Amino acid sequence: MDINKALNEVLVKLFRNITTIEEQSIRTDEFKDVTANDLHVIEAIGIGESKNMTTVAKSLTVTTGTLTISVNGLVKKGYVERIRSEEDRRIVLISLTEKGERAFDHHQRFHEEMVKGITERLSEEEKVILAKSLNNLSDYFKEIRDRMI
């Protein structure tokens, strides 16, 4: 089989499978109203200090307008809260609510289990090769994304 064709098939299947599995894994009674996209916003906001919209939008490589739409939904669902900056009342900071932090932890566990499931089948040498290969893939896609922005 042609290696380029084989790699293309693997990449397409990987992306599709990871997306599908991620969507299904987040569907619990507690988090039935959250999407994978919502979880990525929750992940970018993170636990700890509040962040401004621009910082979160940049980390997700979306516009602040696009992020605002997602945050509006997450505020309505009770995952995120908006807070005015004490130093500059014009600045709106966002942070996770208690429910948002539980969703963050839930999503983190999904990723930890995914990595564990993959790596437990590999030798230490294979883990190193996989990490290097995936870093190369990530760098390539980041370069393409950065050229498009």
Image (spheres, helix red, strand yellow):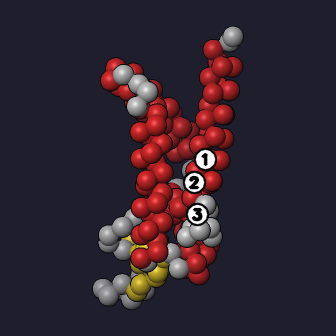
Residue 48: where, in percent of width, then height? 32, 70
Question: Disc 1 vs disc 2: Cβ atoms closer than 8 Å?
Answer: yes
Q: Quadrant of the N terminus?
A: top right
Spatial CA span between label 1 and label 2: 6 Å
| Image mark for residue 63 | none
Judging by the rendered image, the residue that carries numbered circle 2 is: 25
Amino acid type, mark 3 = Thr
- Residue drawn at (63%, 14%) of the image: 3
- Up the image or down, 45 lies above or below 14; here it is below
Residue situated furthest front in the rendering: 29
Q: Residue at x 59, y 81 (%)?
A: 76
Q: Return the x and y of residue 71 as percentages of the image width and height.
A: 55, 73
**Residue 8: x and y, percent?**
66, 26
Residue tagged 1: 21
Residue, disc 3: 28
Give the CA distance from mark 3 to mark 1. Answer: 13 Å
